Amino acid sequence: MSTDTAAVPLPPPAPRTAALDVAALRAATPGMRHAHHMNAAGAALPSRATLAAVTEHLRMESLLGGYEAAEALTARTEQVYHSAARLLGAAPEDIALVESASTAWQRAMGALRLKAGDRVLASSSTYVSSALHLLELQESHGIVLEVLPADGNGQVDLGALETALREPAALVTLAHVPTSSGLVEPVAEAGALAARAGVPLLLDATQSLGQLPVDVEETRCGIVIATGRKFLRGPRGTGLLYVAPEMRERARPDAPDVRGAQWSAAYRYEVAPGARRYETWEASHALRLGLGTALEEALDLGVERIRDHVASLAERLRAALPTVPGVRLTDPPAAASGIVTFLRDGEDPRETVRDLRVTGFRLTTVPASHGQWDLGRRGLERVARASLHVYNSEDDVDGLVAALTARERRRRPEATGVEARATAPVPVVPLPAPVRAAGGGGDRADVIVVGAGIHGSSAAWHLAVRGASVIHLDRFPAGHTRGSSHGRTRMIRRAYPAEVWDGLVDTAYRAWEELELAAGQRLVTTTGGLYARAVGAPGTLRGPGCENVDHVRAAELFPGLRLCEGFSAVHDPAAGVIDAEAALTALAALGRAHGVDRRDGCAVFGWRRDGDGVRVETERGVLRADRLVVCAGPWTGELLPAFAAPLSVVRIVNVHLGSSRRHLLEPPLLGAFSVEVPDIGLLYGIPALGGAGVKIGLDDGPPEDPSEPAGPVTEAERDRLLGLASRFLPAADGPVEETITCRYTMAPNNRFAVGRLPGEERVSVAAACSGHGFKFGPALGAALADLAEGRERPDLDFLSPAAMGITDEPGPGAGA
């Protein structure tokens, strides 16, 4: 058996083609607004056009019906087969559209009808699902499975394959690019050996189609399987199966379906002549049309141009990673695709990837259980994997290297000869923070944050991510209900009274998306919103994408909300609901993960200037910091006396109501809403979500002393809300499921106070958010971090304390 690696030289680099317009590709990819996405080998980001193709067909199905919509777009669906065939160098009749690469594999293998004694030769690059199926066939059908060795470059040993093919074999299978590295297998050479021996080649092109040329004639493949969600940039739930005409003569489906066969007589059927014999009737036509759009985009760009761009970025990353202390490449020598794998010494790759996710880089890990014949053979338990695509740029690659370098500098300062707290310049997406033990108990930090509501928790997390040491204080135990941030849900909307808010609203929406990505969970649900007033009443809301509607149109939009004649409304399609509980939990966890020293149940008595920093008096002793951030909500006036006069604290009551017609109170029949009720006030509501009933409340209430616990909801308060519910929400006829009290800290004209304390540059504040501040939580947290770092935020000048009339704070001893 020959294992001479010199006989199989690596392929020469392909000639370079015209460069891609990466800026245009990024602009056409919505997901690139939110992160540095480097997980194309898991699921690439689709384009805006692909997303539109899917959603438009779903909308058509909702209007016409599924059968009728499919019939109306038959020509477009047929075009998907032609596009796939062009990409593979095949004929349209050779293509089957399936739900995934694994489905394609199973249909193809089932059609081969392998039996006891049949030899299957598999490369060590075989994907886990394929390997598991082969192992099952070995046990249940008695096939003979032989895993081919790899040569010194990591590729399938062609000499070993040639020797193995001297004996009869039923199939050769290899993955063009494995999931576990950037390896590229010599498919054309392997295909030639298999063809010479008269043995079919099954190529797994799951990780190559869309980033590397795959030509079935050149590679001599009898079967090719691929998915849509990876380098093709198609939707999840799509896949391709190519079966050559000569293979179809011997490969009949083992479970024929009405899509691929005709029941011609009582005991007879005929399979379709083409590859569609492997399809099933039930499939998502919307997803297939999305796949068609993605295929057309790949063809328009040209696979050779995609290959050159992706390969260039991967080469840059492979060259740079070994320069990062503590980081080593795990790719084999034959790595030439857009996948790059690596390890950080002494760290579980899952921790590496989690750390990078918080900084805005989206990678993943691959465990040995996904590639025992590769990673297991090489003694690697798990690797971190970056995979690049057309929407990535050199800036993404360099940013990833900088993030890893900064993380290593903080983790092991002795490795780079710099101080442990040294940081690289903070990029648009923050770099990772040092790992510190939560609750460290020291009396000194870079920043002290007072208040663990949405704004304080957001500020603490943003500061820690940027490398600051943070002590985070709250006077009450975690989960208390005496402030303004507790409860299940909050509203988010683009509709605001004046244009001055539009920029901050945009920032808020982006900030929630970034928090969702960091937390790995959905926090915002888009429901749309209606905001109603009596016709002619002053103060109507407006905003980007919003429109004015009359009460008739409002009833069409939200049948669950009853507005009588005399009311008009603003419709905000981007409005939605924030999962407030989950958001606070996520921020606390992210903060602790990045070293925030969270101290709940620790009251602050006062603060004062202390040289170049601040001194904070707490019930547990004195703390010192360079900067102080105050997000104390109803207790702001206690710590910052200049705010005591202009701010007021009021009691707010909410109820959750059940219904015998719950669907009328759930999206899409009801979204976020408010109604300015003459002589009563502003009624607001959150639709029924997550098992909770519809939530309603009035946005004003009597003054309340925050030093005293809020009393329970009174019968009068409850009855007032029930009366409004019966008037505007007729379906809210069920019992009161839950009552809630909270506090609004109100400022003149319902404005905020966000900025540095006048006369005290080392103290920043977010206070008096007047009942509409939760939606801005992550955005204001980032702004507070900027201010604490000495950066200016002129976009927030209209909310500065000075704009509220706050003048210089008293000197040392303030708030004591």
Image (spheres, rainbow, N blue to C red):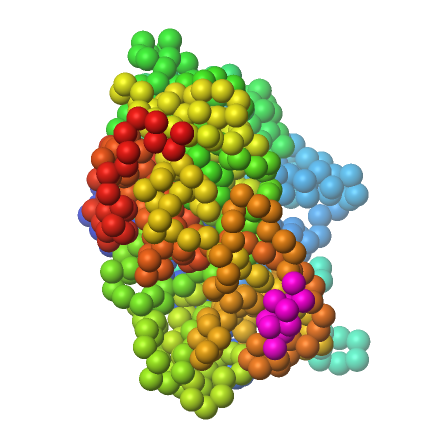
Viewer-closest of 109 and 460: 460
Q: Looking at the image, is 490 positioned above or below residue 698?
A: above
Viewer-closest of 90 and 618: 618
Question: Which image quadrant for residue 17?
Answer: top left
**Total label count?**
0
Residue at image coords 53%, 22%: 620
**Residue 433 percent location from the top left of the image:** 40, 27
Give the side of residue 35 with respect to residue 582, left or right: left
- Res 735 visible: yes
Residue located farthest toward the bottom when viewing the structure as drawn? 565
**Residue 621 percent location from the top left of the image:** 49, 20
The N terminus sits in image quarter: top right
Membership of 345 in magenta stretch: no
**Main SS class of the magenta portion in the image:** helix
**Residue 468 percent location from the top left of the image:** 37, 26
Question: Which image quadrant for residue 132?
Answer: top right
Viewer-closest of 358 and 233: 358
The C terminus sits in image quarter: top left
Give the side of residue 555 with respect to residue 659, left or right: left
Magenta span: 714-723
Residue at image coords 68%, 54%: 110
**Residue 500 percent location from the top left of the image:** 25, 60
- Res 116 visible: no
Q: Looking at the image, is 637 positioned above or below residue 425?
A: below
